[in-house]
Amino acid sequence: MKKLNALSYRSKKRRIDEELQSHLSNFSSLECSSTINNSINHNTDRQITENYPENLVVSNNYDLLPENNVSTNNTFLNIQEPPLQPESSDDHFDSASYPNIDSLLDDNLTLNTEKAFKNELAEWAIQNKIAHTALNSLLLILKQHKCFSFLPKDARTILHTKPIDICKMRDVNPGKYYHFGIENGIIRSFSNCDVRVQHLDEIKLVIGIDGLPIFRSSSNQFWPILAYIRSKLNTVFPVGLYFGTEKPIYSNDFLKDFVNEATQLVSNGILIQNCAYKVVIDVFCCDTPARSFVLKTKGHNGFFFMHKM
């Protein structure tokens, strides 16, 4: 680079103009930044001025301040951008914090559909007198498909067949007898309908006894003892059930459990939901053969037919 004395007049003038323009541009940029810094650090300068003696000159360029006179605790303030405010719940919806409503609705719909299908299948089996073995085979076939995996394996589960307490079953020649109980039937009837609203203080029972053949190709038959509460509830409930190849030989043996419980209820009454009720056997309903069997008289086509009093 040539020395300044060796340059011509024009070269000197051009060099001076370039340096002058460079200084002017630097001065302009410094002035803009100083204006911005002054607006941001106005409060900071005020605090610095208050903390130092009056004869100390404070400049915007903090590098010029003497380090010996600067306190590390109260010298400068860290100016940071204001923290972002959390979005309000109205403007932002966090889907992860709420359950998936669509999935819940789908689950409820699936459960209702499965329950309805089970009920329809059970009604079909009962109405068409489908044997348990046939229904078990059908369930086994259906369960091989994923869409029917919710079905049970056994027909007794879908039909809600309750196990029988064998201890309550006894021999009544020539078959078997199971006693459900009068008291149990009355309590079940009360649970289905609130009879207390009707100011009921006495329970009048209607008892029905009759033979019921089961198959056409076999002599197997039922002899049920049925009952219902007269004039209040028309729901019939079983009291006892006999099964055998023919009717019971001795009617006293067949009616023993019924007579014992009926005698106790008529004498002591029954307590249901903290309310005492009197029990009365209002009437026996039997056809002619059943009445002849219960009363131990000659058959309706027998010689000297009459009832024993």
Image (tube, helix red, strand yellow):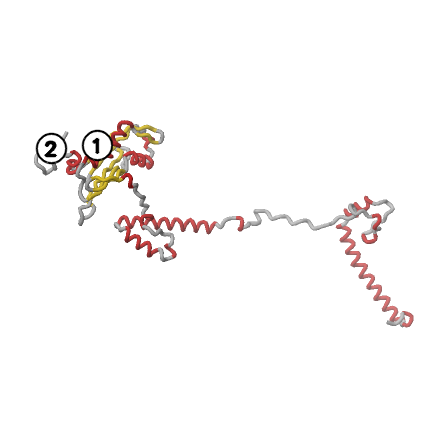
The single residue placed furthest to the left in the displayed view is 303
Does 297 sit left or right of 203 as displayed? Answer: left
**Earlier sequence position, callout 1 versus callout 2:** 1
The C terminus appears in which quarter of the rendering? top left
| Circle 1: element type | strand
Label 1 and label 2: CA atoms lie apart by: 20 Å
Residue carrying label 2: 306
Instruction: Give the residue at x 57% y 47%.
Output: 89
Does 197 sit left or right of 100 as displayed? Answer: left
Q: Position of residue 301 (x, y in %)?
A: 10, 38
Q: Residues within 10 Å of mark 2 (few under 14, many from 20)?
A: some
Dividing the picture into quadrants, the one containing residue 193 is: top left
Q: Nearer the viewer, mark 1 or mark 2?
A: 2
Between 132 and 62, the one lying in front of the other is 132
Q: Position of residue 31 (x, y in %)?
A: 79, 56
Q: What kind of residue is marked 1?
A: Val
Instruction: Give the residue at x 20% y 48%.
Output: 215
- The mark found on residue 283 in the picture is 1
